[in-house]
Structure formats: structure tokens, C-alpha cells
Image (cartoon, helix red, strand yellow):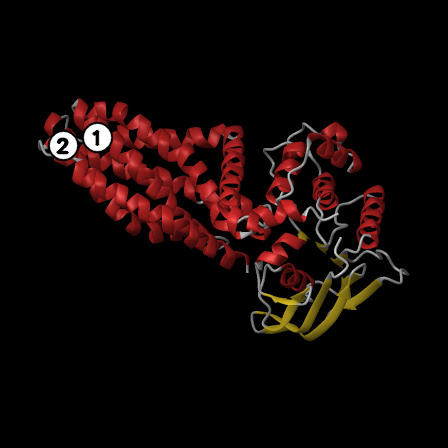
């Protein structure tokens, strides 16, 4: 993983309609750091994450990735960011394995059958491998999204409410994944209501609203 | 750790066409696979087309000459409606389940991914409509040559419907009442295709060559192939913002 991973926000501002969600938001995240974004519903957590992932333009301010200012859908950022949104991009009609395979290929990192099997096993989805995703629970769909994160070699993770619908063992797995990712020099930005990763020196908390 | 070689190959200048082709194949196979597992929806669209075309001879006077005159127009309008019926879902499903965000954040060019979706849409709606047309046209007493001309015109014209329709489908993403807005937005754009497509059959029936009309349809297709995926992918990005 690149040791130069560096995410900077300079005086970011976002609005919904006429209401300002936040303004003048600046921070700098170095390789190995985690930013946990907290705040009440509607305080702009998702908007901030979408700005950082390059899905939405900020009303004001700038985002820099590894020293270069990035616009939404920046080519460099698209190679380096893994975004896990509210929806998991899991297709009902495809099986768990087909979903994971398709998502990895879409990210430009096609997986071997062994990688897929290992990824699904880590997500405790071995038994559901060949089931259409329609038959999976919300938590199991979310696990496919986490298996995707784990299999991708992306320095920047942007996670929107990653713990939603997850059981205790899956949350422990997520914490482990985040730990391994940051130990590897990755950066994580996560919006969550859960007391995730508290007490870790590498974790900074940003409270919106 | 970073498989940067794999990823940069896709976006670096030299390998861009390969990346675009891989992207096109990725989204086309994925959409086809999803479509084949929801065969019911495909069947409903085709049945709609067959029924609309079949209703006209039942509703009008059983006059051979009149029906043969009506045939090209009726079949083309039914093809437009069948295409429109399925267009709403071109991006809506991916928009709802978060796939569209991942498409837009993929290192592959979004226009190529969108092209693959359009190709899958045409293969599942436009192609069967064109292949069924000669059989359905038999109900109107059309001779062999006009029937096959009709099929050829539909083969050239229906991809244009999918391509133009994709722009409308992307522009109306996430809007309330997007379906009816899509029809208002896109049906006027279908007019040239309708005129050249029906005109080709008329020309053949009048003893003329269909080549000018088919050439114009092919020209429409080329323009749409170049422009529509780009326009639709820009509209997708706007919808996600």
C-alpha cells in the first residue's frame, strides 16, 4: 500500500436545498488513520462521505487525494476509493458468488475462484454461495459488500453506516478488516452510530450538526 | 499490495480500448444474465407488442389493401411503445440497489458500461421485436419483400430506439412520474426513425428501392452509437450528484 495516502478536506461546505449542512470543514487524514463521522440524522454524514468518495460536488471547498485536488468522478480517485453506501449494489437475481465476482471485476480487480471462495468464507456465506441474493437477509447482503472491500486493494475506504443490519460477529469482522486495512497504510472514513473503534489512537472522531 | 498494474492498464491511454471493451462486456453480460432470470418481464413486453399489432386488423375493416397500407406504421409504433415500456427499468434497478454508484466509481469508462447496458436492452427487446415483425406483418397481408424490408428496417432502427431511450431514462432517473416524462421526452426524438423505417417499407411496396431509407436509418444508428452513450453517462452522473 502506498505510504503517501493522504486525504485532505479544505473548507468543505454542503447544502441540502437552502439549508447549509456544514461549512468550513477541514481535516487531513494520513495513511493508517480512521475518521469516524458522527452526528444526528440529517446532519450531512452521507453527503460528506459522497463528497469524499467523489460522487457529489461540494458547494464550496476542495478535496485533495495524495496531494492532488480531485473533482467528482476523478480518474485517480476512482482507482483508489472503495465506497460502501446505504445500498450494497447486490443484484437480487444473481447468486452471492456471482455478485461478488461481478463487483470485483467492475472495480478492475477480477478475482480467481479461490479468492471468491475465501472471500465468501470470511463473510460466513459459504452455505449461501449459490443462493440468489433475493434469498439473503439484509445483513448477509451487507457481508457481500464487506467481502468486496476486503478483496479490493484500495487505499481509501469510505463507509456509510457499515454496521447497519450486521450481527455481533460481523461487526467484529468489520473492526478486524478496518484494523488490517489501516495497518497496511490505508485510510478509512466511516459514518456510524455504533461506538466503533473507540479508544484507538489512530481513530479521530468528527461530529456534525 | 496494490495491484496497480491491473488497474492502471485500464485507464492509461494505450489500453483504453481494451478497458472499454471489457467494461462493455461486463455490463452487457450482467444485464443479460439478470434479464434471463426474470424471463416473465421480457415475455410481458413481447406479448404487449404482439397484442398491440394484432388488435389493429381486428379493429379495422377487413380490407386487404387498407391493412397492407397500415402495416408499417402500426408495427413501428408498436415497436416504439414496446421499447419505451422497458426503458424505464434500464437504470432504475441499478439506481435503487446502489449498483449505479459503483458503476460511476469504477475505473472503467462509464460510457462503455452504459453502452453494455444499452446493448443488453436491445438484445432483449429490440432484436426479438425485429425478428417477430415478418410473422406479425403476415396478418396484414404484406408480401414477402416488404415484410423482410420491415424486419431489416427494424434491425437498423431498434438499436437507435434503445440508444436514444437510454438518454431519456438516465435524465428521468429518480424523478417522480419519471415514466410519463420519459415518454414525452423521448417519443419526439423517435420521429426520424419512425419516418425512415416506415418509409422503407412504403418505398418497396411502391416498387422503389428501400436503400435510401435504410441508409438514413444506418446513419441515425451511427450518430446514436457515437453520441448516446456519452450523453447517457453524463446524465447518470448528474442523477447521482
Residue at left 30%, top 34%? B155
Q: What secondary structure is found at the residue carrying circle 2?
A: helix
Question: Residue A156: horizontal and vertical position, in percent?
Answer: 71, 56
Q: Which residue, given by chain and number where applicable, does mark 2 sit on?
A: B204
Question: Residue A177: horizontal and vertical position, in percent?
Answer: 81, 47
Picture layout, residue B113 above or below residue B39: below
In the displayed structure image, the side of residue B73 where residue B23 appears, left or right: right
Count of residue discs: 2
Residue at left 27%, top 31%? B53
User: Is any atom of residue A90 visible in this view?
Assistant: no
Q: Which residue, given by chain and number where applicable, does mark 1 sit on?
A: B149
In the displayed structure image, the side of residue A170 where residue A149 appears, left or right: left
Q: What secondary structure is found at the residue carrying circle 1?
A: helix
Q: Of B160 and B80, which appears nearest the observer?
A: B160
Q: Of B232 and A30, which appears nearest the observer?
A: A30
User: Label 1 crowding class (10 Å Cα cut-off): few <14, some 14-19, many 20+?
Assistant: many
Chain under disc 1? B
| Res B196 quadrant in image | top left
Which of the marked residues, 1 or 2, is nearer the chain's N terminus? 1
Picture layout, residue B104 above or below residue A8: above
Chain under disc 2? B
| Res B140 quadrant in image | top left
In the displayed structure image, the side of residue B77 where residue B17 appears, left or right: right
Question: Residue A188: horizontal and vertical position, in percent?
Answer: 76, 57
Residue B195 image label: none
| Res B159 quadrant in image | top left
Amino acid at each position: 500500500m502506498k505510504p503517501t495516502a493522504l486525504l485532505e478536506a479544505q473548507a468543505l461546505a454542503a447544502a441540502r436545498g437552502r439549508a447549509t449542512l456544514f461549512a468550513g470543514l477541514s481535516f487531513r487524514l494520513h495513511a493508517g488513520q480512521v475518521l469516524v463521522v458522527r452526528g444526528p440524522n440529517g446532519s450531512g454524514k452521507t453527503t460528506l462521505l459522497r463528497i469524499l468518495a467523489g460522487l457529489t460536488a461540494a458547494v464550496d471547498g476542495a478535496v485533495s487525494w495524495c496531494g492532488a485536488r480531485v473533482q467528482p468522478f476523478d480518474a485517480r480517485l476512482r482507482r483508489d476509493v472503495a465506497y460502501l453506501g446505504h445500498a450494497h449494489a447486490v443484484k437480487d437475481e444473481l447468486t452471492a458468488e456471482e455478485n461478488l465476482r461481478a463487483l470485483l471485476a467492475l472495480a478492475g480487480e477480477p478475482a480467481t475462484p479461490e479468492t471468491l471462495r475465501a472471500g465468501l468464507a470470511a463473510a460466513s456465506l459459504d452455505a449461501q454461495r449459490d443462493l440468489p441474493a433475493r434469498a439473503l437477509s439484509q445483513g448477509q447482503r451487507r457481508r457481500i459488500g464487506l467481502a468486496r472491500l476486503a478483496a479490493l486493494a484500495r487505499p481509501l475506504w469510505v463507509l456509510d453506516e457499515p454496521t447497519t443490519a450486521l450481527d455481533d460477529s460481523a461487526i467484529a469482522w468489520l473492526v478486524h478488516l478496518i484494523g488490517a486495512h489501516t495497518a497496511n497504510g490505508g485510510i478509512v472514513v466511516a459514518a456510524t452510530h455504533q461506538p466503533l473503534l473507540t479508544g484507538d489512537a489512530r481513530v479521530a472522531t468528527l461530529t456534525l450538526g | 499490495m496494490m495491484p496497480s498494474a491491473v488497474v492502471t492498464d485500464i485507464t492509461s491511454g494505450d489500453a483504453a480500448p481494451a478497458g472499454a471493451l471489457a467494461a462493455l462486456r461486463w455490463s452487457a453480460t450482467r444485464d443479460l444474465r439478470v434479464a434471463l432470470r426474470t424471463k416473465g418481464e421480457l415475455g410481458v413486453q413481447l406479448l404487449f407488442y404482439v397484442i398491440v399489432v394484432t388488435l389493429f386488423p381486428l379493429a379495422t375493416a377487413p380490407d386487404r389493401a387498407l391493412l397492407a397500407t397500415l402495416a408499417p406504421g402500426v408495427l413501428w409504433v408498436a415497436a416504439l411503445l414496446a421499447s419505451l415500456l422497458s426503458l424505464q427499468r434500464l437504470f432504475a434497478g441499478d439506481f435503487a440497489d446502489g449498483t449505479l454508484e459503483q458503476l460511476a466509481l469504477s475505473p472503467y469508462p462509464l460510457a462503455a458500461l452504459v453502452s453494455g447496458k444499452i446493448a443488453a436492452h436491445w438484445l432483449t427487446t429490440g432484436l426479438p421485436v425485429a425478428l417477430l415483425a415478418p410473422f406479425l406483418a403476415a396478418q396484414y397481408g404484406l408480401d414477402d419483400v416488404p415484410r423482410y424490408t420491415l424486419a431489416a428496417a427494424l434491425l437498423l432502427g431498434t438499436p437507435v430506439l434503445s440508444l436514444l431511450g437510454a438518454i431519456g431514462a438516465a435524465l428521468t432517473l429518480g424523478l417522480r412520474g419519471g415514466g410519463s416524462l420519459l415518454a414525452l421526452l423521448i417519443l419526439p426524438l423517435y420521429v426520424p426513425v419512425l419516418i425512415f423505417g416506415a418509409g422503407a417499407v412504403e418505398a418497396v411496396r411502391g416498387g422503389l428501392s428501400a436503400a435510401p431509407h435504410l441508409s438514413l436509418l444506418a446513419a441515425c444508428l451511427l450518430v446514436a452509437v457515437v453520441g448516446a452513450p456519452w450523453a447517457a453517462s453524463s446524465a447518470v452522473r448528474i442523477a447521482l450528484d
